[in-house]
Image: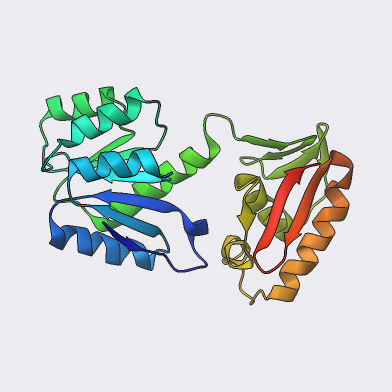
Amino acid sequence: MRTIRGQPYSNLSMRILIVEDDPTLADGLMRSLYQSGYALDVAANGEMAHNMLKDADYDLAILDLGLPKMDGLEVLRRLRQRGGKTPVLILTARDAIESRVQGLDLGADDYLTKPFNLVELEARIRALLRRGKMGSNALLACGKLSFDAVGKRALIDGNVVELSARELGVLEVLMLRQSKVVNKEQIMGALYNWDDDIGDNAIEVYIHRLRKKIEASGAHIRTIRGLGYLLEHE
């Protein structure tokens, strides 16, 4: 197993498992996705992938089908049989319609054939990660506090909370990672598209403002010294 951790500001440290037995292709994918900020693990055969998917939580698996030790479809079948919800993007040279149908019927979320365009692959990855984080319901909740990820609104007991665009960005990160520690780099990543630089002091200001504005909801942003912030329900 090879592991590489993505750059700190992008994609909130989304963790992807690449299941690919071709070392050249696996290395190429790792280099490209690393530049996009993902945390990456690689499994070189189906048996290794099966065990890794059992033992760790991944935001996405990119799965080849023609694997040694265990076929990719069997890896997928076992994942879904045990109730695993990890989104799976099949990336394979098998281009027959029967293979596509079988993969999708077994629970794959997307299917892309080799050779592929890297730009298209990354777009599909982003779409699957968004879908995985939002699930079928785009309304995230923590106590009486809810966040509409589509409309970009925060609500307490159904009433809209007046937040700035940046405060909404910070809150969205905390809601997506509810009950998990979120560090300042991850929060900066959510605000990365803004033109001006965002420093530690600015993040502390946004957190301070959010605490006051969501206080009535019972949701609380706790500071974990030296690590970051934790959104939890009191």
> Residue at 47% across / 38% down in the picture?
131
What scheme was used to colour the molecule? rainbow
Q: In which quarter of the image is the N terminus?
A: bottom left
Q: Is residue 210 above or below residue 149?
A: below
> Residue at 61% across / 73% down in the picture?
195
Residue 193 x, y percent position in the rendering: 57, 66
Q: In this view, does 126 lie to the left or right of 195?
A: left
Residue toward you, 89 or 219: 219
> Residue at 27% across / 22% down in the picture?
105
Residue 144 x, y percent position in the rendering: 80, 34
Q: In this view, does 44 lie to the left or right of 136?
A: left
Q: Quadrant of the C terminus?
A: top right
Q: In this view, does 30 lie above or below 114?
A: below
Residue 83's quadrant in the figure? top left
Residue toward you, 49 or 145: 49
> Residue at 62% across / 41% down in the picture?
149
Residue 190 x, y percent position in the rendering: 59, 60
Q: Is residue 185 left or right of residue 59?
A: right
Q: In this view, does 95 lie to the left or right of 18?
A: left
Residue toward you, 224 or 99: 224
Q: Is residue 102 above or below residue 144?
A: above
Residue 77's quadrant in the figure? top left
Residue 115 x, y percent position in the rendering: 14, 51
Residue toward you, 139 or 41: 41
Count of marks placed on residues: 0
